[in-house]
Image (spheres, rainbow, N blue to C red):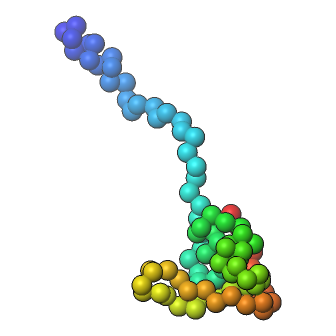
Amino acid sequence: MALLLATAGQLTGCAKSEPCACEVPRACCRGLVPQCAACEEGLTLDAWLKKTCPGGETDAHYGGWDEATQKAIWVCDDGTRQKIQISD
């Protein structure tokens, strides 16, 4: 009987989860536009353009898929495109 009471005392419902300092995953859009690609890489749009377009171009558009590297092909240019705002 004492063993039963001791065991019942340990089973007091669900264990409380320990809080974590986990980073909340970023929710990025899946469009084939620079803003979405930058978000997926965890970069600002300006940083992504500098990385993707090292020639200093100010815009890029999706140019297809490279089967060999399994990466998107981005065509860089200096065109002015209407910018969209993606909220975090």
**Does the rendering let one see residue 86?**
no
Where the C terminus falls, by quadrant? bottom right
Where the N terminus falls, by quadrant? top left
Along the viewing direction, whichever of 32 and 50 lies nearer the viewer = 50
Residue 27 in the image, given as x and y percentages of width and height: 59, 65
**Does the rendering let one see residue 15?**
yes
Task: Give me the residue at 64% from left, 90% from top.
Answer: 75
Residue 30 in the image, given as x and y percentages of width and height: 56, 77
Along the viewing direction, whichever of 30 and 78 lies nearer the viewer = 78
Name the residue at the top extreme.
Answer: 2
Name the residue at the left extreme.
Answer: 1
Task: Give me the residue at 33% from left, 17% from top.
Answer: 9
Count numbered badges in the picture: 0
Q: Is residue 71 left or right of residue 75?
A: left
Q: Is residue 1 left or right of residue 70?
A: left
Does 55 sit above or below residue 11? below
Residue 82 in the image, given as x and y percentages of width and height: 78, 87
Name the residue at the front extreme.
Answer: 55
Along the viewing direction, whichever of 12 and 60 lies nearer the viewer = 60
Quadrant of the image occupied by residue 54: bottom right
Task: Give me the residue at 53% from left, 83% from top.
Answer: 72
Task: Give me the residue at 78% from left, 90% from top.
Answer: 78
Q: Is residue 24 left or right of residue 4?
A: right
Residue 12 in the image, given as x and y percentages of width and height: 37, 24
Does 30 sit above or below residue 6? below
Q: Is residue 69 left or right of residue 37?
A: left
